[in-house]
Image (tube, rainbow, N blue to C red):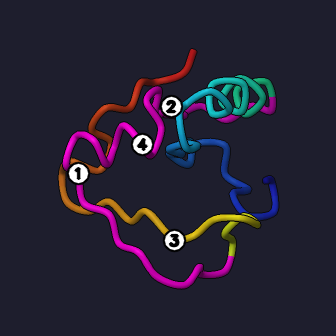
Amino acid sequence: MAEAFPCRRTRLIVGCRAGTRSAPACAQLAEAGYLHILNMPAGFDGWVAAGLPVESGPLQSGGSAGSEGSLRPGGSGAAAGAQEAA
């Protein structure tokens, strides 16, 4: 993570499919010294259920194995539904 985001002040939005893995990931990032972490508590499923924009297609570099597409929120609603991690 430090190689991809060396500045601990970088704003990060963390999510997983249902929101169960992102909370512990946010805690680990906070322990590593990252200051601005947002958790998507309902995950990508919640994002889609809320009708927020999703773009499907081939993964871009940095995607995780098993992912089928990429979520690229845009505009002012980028962090809608996200919670700042402690």
User: Which circle marks residue 52 in the picture?
Assistant: 1
Is mark 3 in CB contact (under 8 Å) with mark 4?
no
Give the labeled residue for mark 2. Answer: 39
Residue at mark 4:
45
The residue closer to the viewer here, 9 or 42, is 42
What is the secondary structure assignment of the residue under circle 1? loop
The numbered mark, 2 or 4, whose residue comes first in the sequence reads 2
Label 3: which secondary element: loop
Q: Report whether 51 appears left or right of 10.
A: left
Would you place residue 4 above or below residue 83 in this image?
Answer: below
At x 73%, y 56%, the residue is 6
- Earlier in the chain: of badge 1 and badge 2, it is 2
User: Which of the 4 image quadrants contains residue 32?
Assistant: top right
Which mark, residue 69? 3
Which residue: 72% across, 24% down? 24
**Residue 69 location in percent, x, y?**
51, 71
